Amino acid sequence: MSETNIYQNLQQLGGKTELPEIPEKAILESVQNPQADVDYMVRFISPEFTSLCPLTGQPDFAHLVIDYIPSARLVESKSLKLFLGSYRNHGAFHEDCTISIARRIIKEITPKWLRIGGYWYPRGGMPIDVFFAQGEIPQGVWVPDQGVAPYRGRG
């Protein structure tokens, strides 16, 4: 590892940080990728993601799986947790939440490749799964299945 402290400009890690009220106010931090000379995949899983239905205000729940192949920057995980938590009081449809999360990550770190699987629990008796991917997977990078089974209810 180099002598440069790649973590010195982080604002949220290592201290108490308030949950942002809305996604637009959330700070999604990144750090320099110290292994940028090699392609590899990073996975974040948020099994208890929550947002609100924009029409009824009722809570919606999802299991999110975010996979990306970094280029020069890595997502800082605490800031990602706070960013995802900012959706707790945000009203939007499943598709909007899932795609806006992907777009924000892409905007902040410009990964070589990113995919997100939004596995939403049933609303009105129907689960909705939302998938998005951008970029090409570099040759030789192991990209495992997201490992989330389709919703089966109690059966």
Image (cartoon, grey):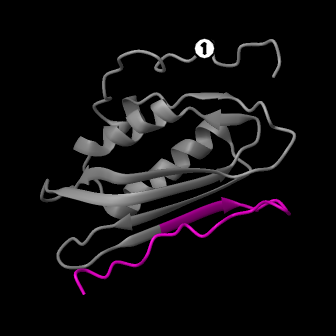
The residue range painted magenta reads 131-155
Q: Quadrant where the N terminus lies? A: top right
Q: Residue at x 83, y 18 (%)?
A: 2
Res 132 visible: yes
Q: Is residue 46 left or right of residue 39?
A: left
89 to 1, vertically: above or below: below
Give the quadrant of residue 8: top right
Main SS, magenta region, reads loop
Report the residue at 40% width, 79% height from top: 150
Residue at position x 25%, y 50% from top? 91
Tell me residue 79's x, y (percent). 47, 31
User: Which amino acid type corresponds to the residue marked 1 in the rendered image?
Assistant: Asn
Which element type, helix, strand or loop, lies under badge 1?
A: loop
Look at mark 1 in the image and give the residue it sits on: 9
Position of residue 10 in the picture relative to residue 97 (left or right):
right
For this rendering, which residue is in front, 137 or 150? Answer: 150
Q: Position of residue 30 (x, y in %)?
A: 61, 29
Q: Residues within 10 Å of mark 1 (few under 14, many from 20)?
A: few
60 part of magenta stretch: no
In terms of image quadrants, where is residue 155? bottom left
**Residue 48, horizontal then vertical, whole percent:** 32, 52
Image-based side of 144 in relation to 98, left or right? right
* Residue 95 in the image: above or below residue 54: below
Is residue 3 or residue 30 the one in the foreground? Answer: 3
Say whether residue 134 is magenta. Answer: yes
